[in-house]
Amino acid sequence: MNDQDARSVQKFMDGVVLRNPGEKEYQQAVGEFACDVIPFVNEHPEYQNHNLSERLTEPDRVIIFRVSWEDDQGKVRVNRGYRVQHSNAIGPYKGGLRFHPSVSLSILKFLAFEQTFKNSLTGLPMGGGKGGSNFNPKGKSDREIMRFCQSFMSELYRHIGSHTDVPAGDIGVGGTEISYLFGQYKRLVNQFTGVLTGKGLSFGGSAIRVEATGYGTIYFMEDMLKHKAQNIEGKTCLVSGSGNVALYATEKLIQHGAKPVTLSDSSGFIFDPDGFDMDKLAWLKDLKEVRKGRIAEYAKEYGVEFFAGQRPWSTPCDLAFPCATQNEVNAEQARTLIENGCIGVAEGSNMGSDAGAIAVYREAKILYGPAKAANAGGVAVSGLEMTQNSIRMSWTRKELNQHLGDIMNNIHERCVEYGTESATHVDYLKGANIAGFKKVADALIAYGVV
Ligand code: NDP
Ligand code: 2IT
């Protein structure tokens, strides 16, 4: 970055920090974007004089509401609900709902901001949004989760709609929660429309949506490897998390002949030196999706080691896939990964790597697939679920997997188009930021001052 670009980024970020005090995750996400997009705008007069960066860092609106619900003991409990409608420049607001005790306005603003550019990259007509609550689903009974979801939707329903805002799942929100939310929406508005994605297959859901984020992350890594005349077969892989994204990333790694050796949850990680196979994965799916158990139980069952309170990044590997939560890889962990032989990182989790880790990847010029490109497969199949709902049809698993693969290929190509630095190096973060920005910016310019 030249001095003039550095000064404009600094000036812009000073304003962002002033307008969003204390919102660390939001400032971080905007900072990563600004470092690529502001120099691009400085070089392209057609994007100047529209104040696009400032407009795109002010969400269209933020809705905050109380969620009261009754627990199994008859006690009234209160949580805070949110929906950040970031931008509908290129389609209805679209993005997941997160239920986790750490949820804050800063986290949801960063997620909604990232979602806008990720959705743009998919090539589908979707704007960006995100929502959720500081509700902790852990240890709650199924009935408590149902009552919480119904209460949450009793306020959210007035702000969403199939042409307005289409929520989906994220951390703590899977098929069960989407079903409760959809059931309540339908009851309140007396309409059966595609207002949520990730629905059950018998009531408007799409094949392959459950698998899409994890599968897509692996497809993206395979595209990056192919661009370097390499492939994924035989590669030792670290995966963090053991939820929706992690389990299906692991499944695709096994299917494509790679060797995934770790998974984790917030209590620690497991290391299976023989790698997971489809039988072990079936056991893991039952543990996590049905019994809602802890990852440590795998260590007991299969006689492998459990590393309490640690993340997997000190295990030697060829490839790493953060698939749990934001800022789960820092600079020191990124250095350890590379020293141990890691040649590529693709993020299933949103903002999985912190700014220090990204600087380390960039310096070492390893393959780095940032979340907004690498994990876009989930929302892409959500977009295809919206299409299927609109035309009242459903496509087959095979067709949808083909679409998913094509969309990930296109995203890879657009990153290469805008992120190629030399004959041997693509900066995928830069490519994703600029390609994602351009489509949204073109729409904003066309609309005039809005
Ligand atoms: P799940 O709730 O299914 O799983 C989350 C996993 O991450 C669990 O293993 C959980 O462990 C772990 N985790 C969550 N928070 C923390 C934390 N603070 N520290 C350590 N581990 C943690 O969520 P998903 O798999 O859906 O989401 C994972 C990531 O992928 C998120 O960043 C999400 O935004 C992103 N993503 C999800 C998409 C989707 O379609 N679901 C699409 C694109 C991105 P524990 O059970 O102990 O909490
Ligand atoms: O971060 C994400 O892209 C998601 N949680 C999925 C959003 C969606 O609308 O499917």
Image (tube, grey):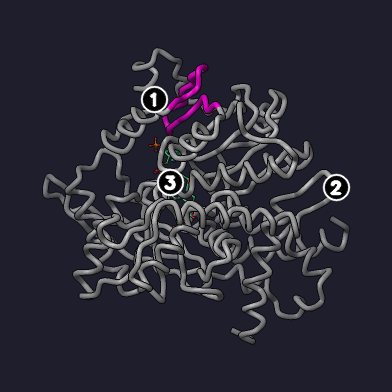
Which residue is depicted at the point 60% across and 37% down?
329
Indicate which disc, 2 or 3, sits on the residue closer to the N terminus: 3
Quarter of the view holding residue 410: bottom right
Which residue is depicted at the point 40% across and 39% down?
243
In this figure, which residue is indicated by the disc labeled 3? 211
The quadrant of the picture showing ligand 1 is top left
Q: Residues within 10 Å of mark 3 (few under 14, many from 20)?
A: many
Q: Is 206 covered by the magenta stretch?
A: no
Find residue 440 and report its horizontal and vertical position in percent: 62, 72
Q: Gap between marks 3 and 1, in whole Å?
A: 17 Å
Residue 280, disc: 1
Residue 423, disc: 2
Find residue 65 and report its horizontal and vertical position in percent: 33, 65
Determine the secondary structure under disc 3.
helix
Indicate which disc, 2 or 1, sits on the residue closer to the N terminus: 1
Q: Quadrant of the C terminus?
A: bottom right
Find residue 258 and report its horizontal and vertical position in percent: 56, 29
Determine the secondary structure under disc 1.
helix
Q: Residue furthest right?
A: 3
Q: Which residues are magenta?
A: 259-277
